[in-house]
Amino acid sequence: MINFNQQEQQCFVSGRLTQVEVKQLWPKRQQLFTDTTQVIDLSALEYVDSAGVALLLALVRLTHSGSKKDSASRQLVNPSEQLKKMIELYDLDAFFSQS
């Protein structure tokens, strides 16, 4: 199960993000965050598979209306230890921040 906890300009994501959750979230991915969400904190993610990583990369590029924003306006931060392994495996350091 995946949870999104919006707190002002930051959203804390917790739980598991697997292909099963991605299939459920994909149709409503544009409504997961507010337009003012600038930071997506991933420190509480327990597990992420490759489908989950793909969803995270898609989410960082979307606004509420579905148009693309420049990548500096929304950041993926504090990847969990398990997610760090996926980032390293797929060489995705440029998309995630440690702060």
Image (cartoon, rainbow, N blue to C red):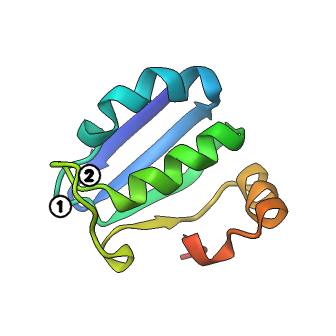
Q: Is residue 1 visible?
A: no
How many angstroms separate mark 1 from mark 2 (CA)? 10 Å
> Which sits in the foreground, 60 or 44?
60
Locate residue 11 relative to residue 94 in the image: left or right.
left
Quadrant where the C terminus is found in the figure: bottom right
Write down the quadrant of residue 26 in the picture. Answer: top left
User: Where in the figure is residue 54, as x and y percent of width and height?
Assistant: 58, 48
Locate residue 73 relative to residue 16 in the image: left or right.
left
Amino acid type indicated by mark 1: Thr
Amino acid type indicated by mark 2: Gln
Locate residue 55 relative to residue 20 in the image: left or right.
left
Q: Which residue in the protein does label 2 denote?
A: 7
The residue at the point 68 percent across, 74 percent down is 93
Mark drawn on residue 36: 1
Mark 2 lies on a secondary structure that is strand
The disc, 1 or 2, on the residue closer to the chain's N-terminal end is: 2
The residue at the point 62 percent across, 48 percent down is 53
- The correct choice, above or below, for 21 with respect to 98 in the image is above
Locate residue 79 relative to residue 38 in the image: left or right.
right
